[in-house]
Structures are given as C-alpha cells and as structure tokens.
Amino acid sequence: MNINQSPGLSGDDLQEHQTTLNSDKSLMTNKVVDDIKRKQEEKATHKLAEKLSLPYLNLMNYQPEPGVVNIVPKELVKSGNVFAFKKKQHSVYLAISDPANPHTIEVLKKLQALDQYTFIPVLVSGSTMKYLVAVYDIFAPKERPRNEEINITEDAQKQSTATFKNWQSGNTKLEQAALTDLFSTILANATYTEASDIHIEPTKEAVHLRFRLDGMLQDVATLPISTLSSLISRIKLLSSLKLNLTDSAQDGRFSLRAGKIGYDMRVSILPTAHGESAVMRLLPQEGKFITLEELGLTSHYNKVVESIIRQPNGLILNTGPTGSGKTTTLYAILNKINSPNKKIITLEDPVEYHLAGITQSQVNPDENYTFATGLRAILRQDPDVILVGEIRDGETANIAINASLTGHLVLSTLHTNDAAGAIPRLADLGLKPDYFIEAILAVIAQRLVRKLCTDCVEEYKPTESELSEIKSELDALPPQITKPALPLVLKRPNLDKMKTCELCHGTGFKGRLGIFEILEPKENIVKAVLGGVTIGEIKKMAMANGMITLKQDGIFKVISGLTTLEEVIRVTGENTD
C-alpha cells in the first residue's frame, strides 16, 4: 500500500512523519559514523600503546574508584590530562592520552614527589580522557583530604647529623638520593638542631639549604639544582597547594611529629628568578612554657611586671620587630595569671601556642573574621583577660583600648623600635592621646639575644674598648638602679671546643633570652604626651622615672655571663664606636 494513501493521515501528518523518519535515519547514520570513528581511535591508541610499551585500556563509561581520583589534583588533571582511576596496594594507575605532551610529562614529574605511591601510566584515547575529565567532580570528594602527619623517629633525628656531614663533604650523591630520604633528613635535622625555620633557596647552579638557629640563619647544605622541583612539589602536596601554579606566591601548612614533639609547619612558597623558594616555619605544639624569669626579666623589671599583670583592667603593649619574642612573652604572662576564676580569650594569626584553660581563636580574613570583628565577638563572651595577637589598624586599636577602659585586661603587640615609639604609633592609627594614654598600664619593648652555650664557653679578660662600652651604659643608668662594678672577666664561645660541641652544633650559642625596656606612663609622661612631646623626650622622662633601655638591660646580661657584648650590639643596633 502506498503510504500517501493511508487512511486517517492528513497531508501535514504525512509530512511530519516523513521528517521524523529522515531525522531518525540521520541520527542512526551519525551514530554509526561516530562508532566507527571511536573504534578507529581506540585501535590507533592501542597500536600507539604497543609501540611505546605502555598498557592500554578503553575506559569510556568506566566508573573510577572515588578514593583514588583526587590523588591527582583537579588542576593537574586539566592541565596535563593525567587521571588516577585505580589503586592496588601502593600502586596507582594513571590514565594518560598524550604521553609526548610537555604538560603531561611535567605533571608526571611532579607526581613523583608523592612518594608513598608507585604510579603506573596507562594509555587511553582522547575521547576517553574527555570523559574522565568530565566525571572528575562526580567521583572526587569535594574537599581533598589533608595528608597524614609526617612522623620522624628520635633515631632518625640523631642519624641526620652524620648524613648532613656527608652532604657537606660531598661524599653522598644527592642527585640519586630518594626524595623521601632527602626531605625526611632535612626535617629530621631541623628538628634535632631546634631550628625555627627551614629555607630552601634556588640559585642558577644549586639549591642552598639554610636553617635559622637561635635567630641566626646558618648554611647547612648545598643541594643539586635537580632536587629543587621534587622538593617543592613534595612540600606543595603536603601543604595542599597548587602544583601547577609556579609564578605566584602560595601559603599553606602541614603537620609533623619528630620524636615526642608535634609541629605545625607553616609554609611559604615564592617564585624567584631561578625557581620557587620555600620557607617552612616550625611551630612546636608541645613545648613547655618559659617563665618570665627564664625569658630574662631580671630583678629590676620583675616587680614592674608583677604589678601590671595583676591589674583588673588596662592595656599592656609588647613592641618589637617580627621574631623578637613578643608572643612568647605575652603567653608567659598568660600562663602566670591563668586560673580557674578567670576567663581568658586570645585572638591570633596564627595560634602559635596551646595553653590549657584558655579559649583560643584564629582570625580568618577570607571569611571576614579579622582582628576587629573577632575582638567585637570576644567582648560578648564575658572575658576577664584578652590577648589580641597584633594591633594592625585603627579599628582594632580603638576596640582594644575601649575594652581596657571598660573592665578588661588587654594584652597586644605593636611593631615599633622601642617602648616610647608605641605612643606616636597609636596616634598614627588615628587615636587621640587623651583617649589612649591613661588606658596603657605599660609598654614593653624587647629583643632576643643568643645565650652562650654552657658546654663550650670560656672566660676572658675584657678589652679596654669593651670596658669603655660597658661603663658608658652603666653611667647612664637611672639613679634608682644599683650600678654593678665593671667586670674583671667576661664570657665568650671557645673556638676550639665549639667546633665539636654537640649541644650547640658548632655555633657557640644555645637558646635565646630577652632584653627588655618597660615604659610606665606615669603622671609626668601622661601630661607630656597630652602636650605633644617627641619620642626622644618621652624616652628621657621614662629613663628618669627608672626605665632601663634595651642596651642597658643587655649589658646586665653580658656582665652576668649569659651572652656577649657583640651579641647585644648586634641586636640593639647601638654602637658608640
């Protein structure tokens, strides 16, 4: 029967029916063509795999293992077409579609830093790779899990010293060293020597490894430039940073346990002319708290500090440059006044110490949780004592001072060179002197000097120049302070003993202590500040009231045999020569 003569169908119906048939034929034809192309693509990929001696798989519509997919970060999947789809024990199977692509090769090199896995590349077609990239978010967790804490044994810490000596003498071929051993040895030696920072600095020819020991950077090893990429990738992976981002700074963190001590590792990555530089700060989480006396607050300042920290309200400011021990001092104060009948809350960036019995909070600017917003929230928690990590702006300063005037003891830090400099600094932040000067209980300025190693120290007779320097500072002491006699002997590192000293690792110094000056805004200073005097005049009045300067306090430590005159001059930047 002719379809045009079919009963019950109009001309329009017949036309629509014919169009549908043609469309179905077209779709069927396109599907057949696509199937043929796909089969040809898979066949060509299979042949290429055989040529390259690589495994081949057709993973179209394959469901990857969810716990495996995110081993390769999404940014590397997109940039390098490398996809983790299966894991068997420590082996991870990676789908790759273009093994000659420089981006793919670079990603595979970066993944070598994740040395807990053995990666097995498997060749897939371009169409398969498009499918895998499209399903990444379905099978990968929304948030990448943080890497497990690194553990270093006490034996590994001790053995790291011998390894470092081999590195320094050139007896070990570091180009062939496994990344796991290289990175773990760096961490082991840094924790063993009690370094506060690890610096990985690339140059054109090599990578310089330096530790900051007792505040001073020390060269510890020179590594081949070939180790840089793997080291940086390892650090980035541990810190959950972007591996493919190499031209911008990144910050992250990871956890480390070395022996009995846990560390919070703060990481900074910076692009340089010769590759990425890394600095890792080691923040011990289980170290014992240092007392105010151990910090170096000697008899002439003990009474001052004991008095101000027992006040129910007011502002205590601690000033000095970064790394001068301000937070350590404030926590020593908190530890001293901490008791069950006091509510103590801290607001920090970051939280560097953990103290039982107090509430600690960390700012998060990305979520608009700043010092100012956090401080407002803290005041609604009915605290007795508040520690604000740093006063950076006028808003935070205003809230902190207002809190100190309304029944709270507030502790905070400022970046100024000396105690007297805190007053104009607050004015620079937009606060009026008549508002803040009477709120201040005291301004503490401090620096850290290295303590002489007790195992390789020696006594010596001071030179005329040294005695003149010491006498000059002692003669300028306030009349309220008892002047000590000029020393007959001083102490310094013994150059021969320190070379083999295991306590200080050849530096001649072990540990640090503070040198301080404490300004109390007594009545004459309050009147002077309201009258608009200079920093120099404020400092002179404070000294007349009994304030000992940073350098004078350092001289007391020199006479006591705790440090050297050169160290005090280095830290204070004051030399009469």
Image (cartoon, helix red, strand yellow):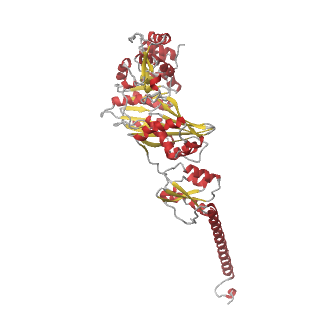
Indicate the position of residue 460 as horizontal and vertical percent values. Answer: 44, 15
Which sits in the foreground, 388 or 555?
A: 555
Indicate the position of residue 503 as horizontal and vertical percent values. Answer: 42, 29
Q: Is residue 259 above or below residue 309?
A: below
**Residue placed at 61% from the left, 52% from the top?**
105
Which sits in the foreground, 371 or 324?
A: 324
**Residue placed at 36% from the left, 20% from the top?**
302
**Residue placed at 44% from the left, 43% from the top?**
255
Tell me where residue 305 sits by quadrant. top left
Asked if one can make out residue 447 in the rendered structure from this viewpoint, the answer is no
Indicate the position of residue 400 as horizontal and vertical percent values. Answer: 44, 30
| Total number of numbered discs in the rendering | 0
In the rendered image, the residue lying farthest to the front is: 171
Which sits in the foreground, 77 or 489?
A: 489
Q: Is residue 58 above or below residue 117?
A: below
Indicate the position of residue 568 as horizontal and vertical percent values. Answer: 48, 20
| Figure quadrant of the C terminus | top right
| Figure quadrant of the N terminus | bottom right
Asked if one can make out residue 541 in the rendered structure from this viewpoint, the answer is yes
Q: Is residue 345 above or below residue 148?
A: above
In the drawing, does residue 312 fall left or right of residue 194? left
